[in-house]
Amino acid sequence: MKLFQMNKDELLDFKNKTQSAYDSFKALGLSLDMSRGKPSAEQLDISMGMMKVLDDGNYSDSTGFDCRNYGVLDGISDAKKLFAPMLGVNTDEIIIFGNSSLSAMYWCVQMAYTHGVLGAKPWSKCDKVKFLCPVPGYDRHFKVTEFFGVEMINIPMTATGPDMDMIEKLVAEDDSIKGIWCVPQYSNPDGICYSDETVKRFASLKPKAQDFRIFWDNAYCIHHLTDSPSYILNILDEAKKVGNENIVYMFGSTSKITFPGAGVAFLGASKENIDALKEALGVSIISYDKLNQLRHVKFFGTYENLVEHMKLHTAVLAPKFNAVTDMLEAEIAPLGIGDWVKPEGGYFVSFNSLPGCAKRIVQLCKEAGVVLTGAGATFPYGIDPEDKNIRLSPSFPTTDELTKAMELFVICVKLASAEKLLSE
């Protein structure tokens, strides 16, 4: 029986039984963290061979450049060749940054604020700056624009990506809208892949603001959970077809491929965008960590090897994601008190509770020893208008820990839902 079909006495009995199960879990004294999408120790072990690739004493790339020294601002040529296919760009359309793609995104926003985009007025001198934010979305994207005082506008997600009708209308009418955050493949947290039509419509946008940029964070483009993965169109290729290639900045990294905090990040864009960004970058830094770039090049050798490497991650992650969605299907679906998308890739499962229950569910889990991402984190300013979205991060716990955490989670969903229905 669906929970909302129960009469008051049935609902009260359900609540009391669920409360008893919750109290039993609370007595276990659990201490589990599912708050961030961190790779597990088992995943980190997959790349440990990288720590030995420089033991041969050869610190030069294929051009003979000594990677221990200053120079090569935008990344060694071998690293460009390795990572350019990941973004689908040419080697003159990529900059190799340090260890964080988020830092690269922050820097691009910062440069737009202080110096403008390709000769346009600096955003800091504009009366107002706005960003479009597909929701639910990535909390750290929203924190960047919030830090700069940007007004953020929620854009609902659909099964094919953000609401493009809304986006096209807004950017065509308002020149204070300067950008949009996007995670186009296996979106954070919904796991949605943008459709071909969505990508083409993004590439063909005609914003009133000439300095409008799509921040295309393709963080999960090779993070598949199945043997028949989904792929999306290359937005830069599509933008070139319509003479709109300057509209997009594309980002990626190896943070969840090798070592978070010690990976390699990169930005892909049109040649004109790249040249302008390189000029600014050269003022702030002489070069990033080229030995780390070389480590990645020697470890992988080719992009094809990198793709094969990801299958090792899939073998670790897929059973964990199945554990989460199987539990939801068995315990929540029959009661009609939540919905979710079973992702084919990425790092998250996005769960929607009954409206008004997310904060309570997260609180109940925390009190019983399981820490989740805060309710509201997937919306700008931390405000979920319906208080229903919860981002689940299955990657870090062991499978046994994850199973125990999900047993508690579904109990908390049931309890919070019963409380909500009884209060109405």
Image (cartoon, helix red, strand yellow):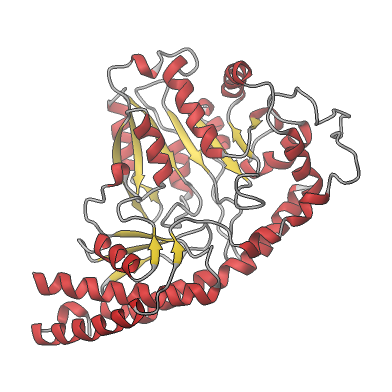
On the rendered structure, is 417 left or right of 129? left
Check the picture and name the quadrant holding the N terminus.
Answer: bottom left
Q: Is residue 227 visible?
A: no
Residue at image position (15%, 82%) is 11
Number of marks present in the image shown: 0
On the rendered structure, is 274 left or right of 296? left
Measured as percent of width and height from the top left, residue 37 is found at 50, 56
Measured as percent of width and height from the top left, residue 372 is found at 39, 61
Measured as percent of width and height from the top left, residue 161 is found at 40, 50
Above or below 12: residue 318: above
Q: Dividing the picture into quarters, in which one does residue 409 lie? A: bottom left
Measured as percent of width and height from the top left, residue 70 is found at 76, 23
User: Which of these two is toward me, 294 or 196?
Assistant: 294
Check the picture and name the quadrant holding the C terminus.
Answer: bottom left
Q: Is residue 290 visible?
A: yes
Residue at image position (38%, 33%) is 145
Residue at image position (58%, 36%) is 237
Residue at image position (37%, 66%) is 340
Above or below 97: residue 260: below
Q: Dividing the picture into quarters, in which one does residue 350 lie? A: bottom left
On the rendered structure, is 206 left or right of 51? left
